[in-house]
Image: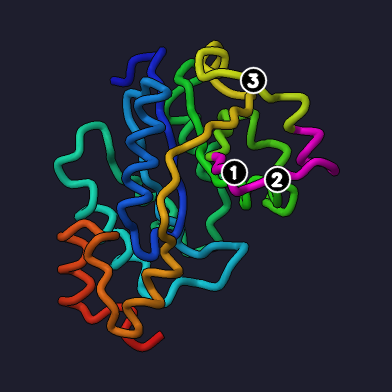
Amino acid sequence: MTNPQAVIALLGGTFDPIHLGHLRSAQELKEVLAADELKFIPCHRPPHRASPGVSSQQRLAMVELAIAGLDGLSVDDRELQRDQLSYTIDTLIALRREYGEQVVLCWLMGVDAFNHLDSWHRWQELLDYAHIIVMARPEASLVTQGPVAELLARHKVASPSQLLQQASGRVLLQTLTPYPISATAIRQALSQGQPVSQYLPDTVLDYIEQHQLYRSE
C-alpha cells in the first residue's frame, strides 16, 4: 500500500528511443523532489505528433531494458492498453483514483510541450489531478502571453518544497542539467549508420541492433 504522503513523479513520452538524457533527467528530478518513485509512461498514440515508426511494444521493451536495476524507476504501460489516442488527462484521472487524494502526483514535461498546453485535451483540468513540473533548459523560453502564461502566473511556485505542500494544483519550473542529444537526432544517426553508443544504454542499443530498428527512416 502506498504511503499517503508519497511523492510520485510521472514522465510521459514516446521514448522513441529512450536515451541517457531521459534517464539522467528522471534521476535528477527524482532527487530534487525526493520522490518515492518515478514512473515512465510510454505514449501509445500521441495526439500532437505522428505515430512513432516502431511499435508501442518495442518502445515499452526499450524503456524496461533501460531502467532495469535502477532504484526508484518504473514503467507504467496503461496508455498502451488503451487502443485510442493517449490523453494525459485520462491517465492522471486513473492514477489519482488508484493512489487516492493525498499522494503527491507530479507530471513532468518539457518547455515546448508546456508552451502549447492549451492544445491538450481538457488541459485546464490537469492541475486538478497533479502538479506540473516544467523541465526548463537554458536555451528554452517560456510563453509570455495567452492562456498558458496566465495559468503559469496563477499556479507557479518557486521551490519543490512549496510544490509538495499539497497533492496537486501547482506548477514548478525546474532547470535541469543539459544533455546534448535528442531522440530525433538518435533516430537520424541510426538511419545513416552512425554510432550512437554514447547516447544509449547498452541494453537499448543491443535491442535496436537485434531488431534492426530505425534503419529505414
Q: How many marks?
A: 3
Q: Is residue 51 left or right of residue 8?
A: right
Is 158 positioned to the left or the right of 189 in the image? right
Q: Residues within 10 Å of mark 1 (few under 14, many from 20)?
A: many
User: Under tag 1, what secondary structure?
Assistant: helix
Q: Which residue is mark 3?
A: 157
- Disc marking residue 89: 1
Kind of residue at badge 2: Arg
- Answer left or right for 196 relative to 147: left
Q: Residue 102 location in percent, x, y?
A: 48, 15
Amino acid carrying label 1: it is Ile
The part of the chain drawn in magenta is: 136-151
First in sequence, mark 1 or 2: give its number: 1
Which quadrant holds residue 195? bottom left
Q: Are marks 1 and 2 in contact (CB under 8 Å)?
A: yes
Q: Quadrant of the N terminus?
A: top left
Label 2 sits on residue: 122
Q: CA distance from mark 3 to mark 1?
A: 22 Å
Using the image as rendered, state which of residue 161 and residue 164 is in the foreground.
161
Q: Nearer the viewer, residue 60 or 191?
A: 191
